[in-house]
Amino acid sequence: MRPAASNQLLDGLLVLDCSILGPGLAGGLLADFGARVIKVESLGGDDIRRVTWPIVHEQRTDGEVESNSLFHLHVNRSKESMALDLSTPEAILVFEDLVRRADVVIEGMRPRFLEKKGLTFERLVKLNPRIVVCSISGFGTGSPYERFPSHGVGFDAWCGVVRPDMEDDGSLEIPDQVNVGMTFGPVLAVTTVLGAVLRARTSGSPAFIEISQSDAAAYFDWYRIETEQAYRRPSDEVSGVAADEGRRRAPGLAGLRGAVRYQFYETADGHVLFMASERKFWRNFCEAVGRVDLFERWPGAELGDHAVGNRELKAELRLLFASRTTSEWLEVSERHNVPIVPANSHDRLSSDPQFRSRFTWLPAADLGADQLEVPVRLDGDRLPEPRRAPRHGQDTGRILAEFLGYDQEQVRALEDAGAIPRMS
């Protein structure tokens, strides 16, 4: 058992998480940092437990097999689950009781979900004058695409982060890439929510925050988008770097196509990324491998010179890198001040010494699947130990009785009205 956190960063913060699927990561991050997060979900439950792969099957103590997606186990860890049918007036009253005690309400689904239930921002402020409400949706409230249904890859395809791969037969495929909008949207939400909570506690002001996952995907890719915008200006106003003699390169990493001194190379047992785009690093490399002749012949510019298109130099470097193992090249990097990193695959990353030293695996025995702890260091302290993602509605009765103070008669009335599931 690891030592307990001595100072939970968000201890005392209460969050009502009305989200489904990916936007649940916002509440998940807040829970990782110590907030109490109550996941308010429909009587049917969030599809996140069944959608996406892999699915983890576990045998419970009662002999039943419980199946959950890794997505759910990670995104909803450390949360409590309360099942409420917000289409009933009785459930609305329960939700309003929760709002009176909460600091934050997260709405993570299509826009205006709570508003359509009569739970407008104005109504929530009347219940709690310092409430912070954050709406996370695909394309944003009031936008031309507001009513479009979509999933995570859709936000990245819309802004050009993900581009289709073409097969030999001319058909198109989705490439293997990280989900940007689905991940950065919740991170952007958490950053803004915490700022709004800080303001609410000092000024008493409420806040309504609107986060679009497609907006987040585009902003995450600001460098390429802003480069395209800059290139609309005349070439005498916006050019390439000095090493390119003013020629404009393609935006972002596409500008490294054909690069030689900033490129992947195959080693004797894997791959590395070589990044000697500054003259000092290129000199260090040539001296380290006993090939000063390469530096003398192609010294390059002082900064940003990738020797684009130099096939002769690339052939020499291919032979050099193939002559040593990846670990040997990392020794060169450390001893001679040359930028070289291993090019890992996901299946090999966990054995990388850097990864092992920086990340902590949270065990499957506790959380249902091996999961990564949030990689944040707190001056020797630890984040709160995560708890297993909740079963659907498992905390409904306890929240009603212990937190809201409802008696058994009130709970039975809610069951009879269909506002909550029957718990016995």
Image (tube, rainbow, N blue to C red):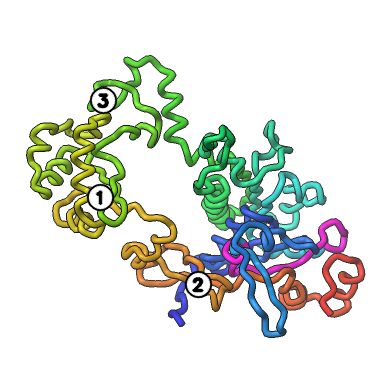
Q: Nearer the viewer, mark 1 or mark 2?
A: 1
Q: What is the x, y in percent for residue 253?
A: 38, 37
Residue at mark 3: 244
Q: In the rendered view, would you say 320 is above or below 86? A: above
Residue at mark 1: 340
**Marks 1 & 2, CB-CB < 8 Å contact:** no
Q: Residue furthest front?
A: 169
Secondary structure, mark 2, is loop
Q: Nearer the viewer, residue 350 or 246?
A: 350
Q: Residue at x 67, y 43 (%)?
A: 150
Residue 332 visible here: yes
- In screen coordinates, is 228 left or right of 298? right
Circle 3 Cα neighbour tier, 10 Å, few/some/many (<14 / 14–19 / ≥20): some
- Quarter of the figure with residue 412: bottom right
Query: In this picture, which residue range is highlighted in magenta?
Result: 72-91
Residue at mark 2: 384
Question: Nearer the N terminus, badge 1 or badge 2?
Answer: 1
Q: Amino acid at mark 1?
A: Ile
Q: CA distance from mark 3 to mark 2?
A: 50 Å
Q: CA distance from mark 1 to mark 3?
A: 23 Å
Q: Nearer the viewer, mark 3 or mark 2?
A: 3
Q: Tell me if residue 76 is in the magenta stretch.
A: yes
Quarter in which the C terminus is drawn? bottom right
- Quarter of the figure with residue 144: top right
Q: What is the x, y in percent for residue 310?
A: 23, 30
- In screen coordinates, is 317 left or right of 93? left
Q: Nearer the viewer, residue 321 or 370?
A: 321
Q: Tell me if residue 312 is in the magenta stretch.
A: no
Circle 1 Cα neighbour tier, 10 Å, few/some/many (<14 / 14–19 / ≥20): many
Q: Amino acid at mark 3?
A: Asp
- In screen coordinates, is 275 left or right of 73? left
